[in-house]
Image (cartoon, grey):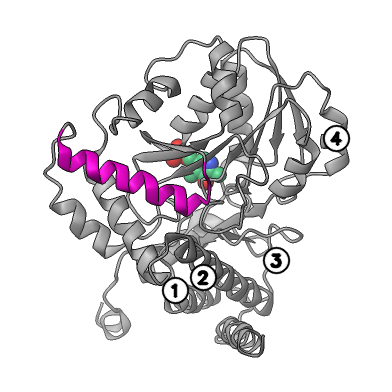
Amino acid sequence: VIGELQYRMIRKSRLFTPGPTPLLPAAQFAMAAADLHHRTPEFRALFARVVKQLQEFIGTQNEMLLLTSSGTGAMEAAVANLTSPGDPVLVLSAGKFGERWASLANTFGCKVATVSAPYGSTFDLDQIRNQLTGDVRVLFMQATESSTGVRHDVAKVAELLRQADTLLVVDAITGLGTTTLDVDKLAIDIIIGGSQKAVMVPPGLAYCAVSQRAWQRMESSRQPRYYFDLQRERKAAATPEGSFTPATALVVALGAALDFLAAQGSGSVAEGRCRLIANAETCAAMTRAAAGAMGLELFARSSPAAALTAIKSPQGMDSGEVVKAIKTEFGAVIANGQGEMKGSLFRIAHLGYFDYMDTLAIIGALEHVLASLGCDVELGHGVTAAQREYASRKAKAVTA
Ligand SMILES: *Cc1c(COP(=O)(O)O)cnc(C)c1O
């Protein structure tokens, strides 16, 4: 025990998971004072302001809805409001969240066709084109697949849908704030985000932007829906309120987080979002460089997301051991693989409230942990590669 006491440091709890992500302190403080009734002028004013800021954050003219649920609630709402039983729909699936679209659409009795890609890869556009028969009513996809760390090319898929009567629904729950998406130009009919991802507040709110075409489709869609009836939510939002009791404290927190983004972006939420995306890109590039220098293999090689980096566990090592050791020795939480990927990879998040310091620290911790688990890792190689990546991005930006 004495030996251990000589090196053991205090442990701060830190999340490096792709949701929930670290909380913005200003959002936490705001939440603590949130003793508001939801049917009051004060709350209505806040609700209206947050919805407006979210619209800027997404970068759309489409109407925004704020739902009290986790992100999956908004995914279910998209299926329940846009389809009818028996509708042919197409799901692009390359991971656990793509699979979630397929099971949701099956649950609602849609005729589900799937274009899949192996875990760690993105889709072949020709395969999508071949599946896009004229009768496909909705295409469901992720912007970034959080289970594998892959970014999908939403713009290319959107191009395939030009002129078609197929609606495009994008789960951008880890895509928003990590990927540039011109929602209106790409004609994304419903784009979905969640509070516990890039917007730095606790889980419990989902938000989505709904196109004119999507509202029209809802007139004729015949699925049972109650809590997630988006047309009713739209009417309430016009007052401006939620239909039921919203998670008021989270709305307050979200307002504070969007104010923070505006402050980061010289007063503009849209500019704050650009900074947030660049921030995630830099953290991700540093992490990928470090992995390479440490002799680790990336799980998503050809199309890595900025939201998170998935790294393969060294040969013969269960990734659960890495996750556990980082928690025990340093108090930090990284994510194991999900489902069939459990044990073979670990995931480090970059979306939201992460910075240079956080990124270097987790890389340094990873080096220690891998070395003590018996991997052939030279301390400092990963950290140095990450620093060089930062320096080279900085130099490029300065000369540009
Ligand atoms: C986190 C996440 C979700 C939603 O998960 P919830 O637990 O319902 O909030 C959906 N899709 C992706 C890509 C995610 O990262």
Mark 1 close to ligand 1, CB under 8 Å: no
State which mark lies toward you, 1 or 4. 4
The residue under label 3 is which amino acid type?
Glu
Q: Earlier in the sequence, mark 3 or mark 4?
A: 4
| Dot 4 or dot 2, earlier in sequence | 4
- Number of numbered discs overlaid on the protein picture: 4
Instruction: Name the residue located 66 percent from the left edge and 90 percent from the top edge.
Output: 399
Q: Is residue 196 above or below residue 141?
A: below
**Mark-to-mark CA distance, 4 and 2:** 34 Å
Which mark is first along the chain, 1 or 3? 3
Q: Is residue 373 left or right of residue 53?
A: right
Secondary structure of residue under mark 2: helix
Mark 3 → mark 4, Cα distance in angstroms: 32 Å
Look at label 4 and name its amino acid.
Arg
Residue 92 at what x, y percent from top left? 71, 36
Q: CA distance from mark 3 to mark 1?
A: 23 Å
Question: What residue does disc 2 label?
Answer: 279
- Label placed on residue 355: 1
Residues rendered magenta in the picture? 40-61
Looking at the rendered structure, the secondary structure element under dot 1 is loop
Q: Main secondary structure of the magenta part?
A: helix
Determine which residue is flagged by label 4: 129
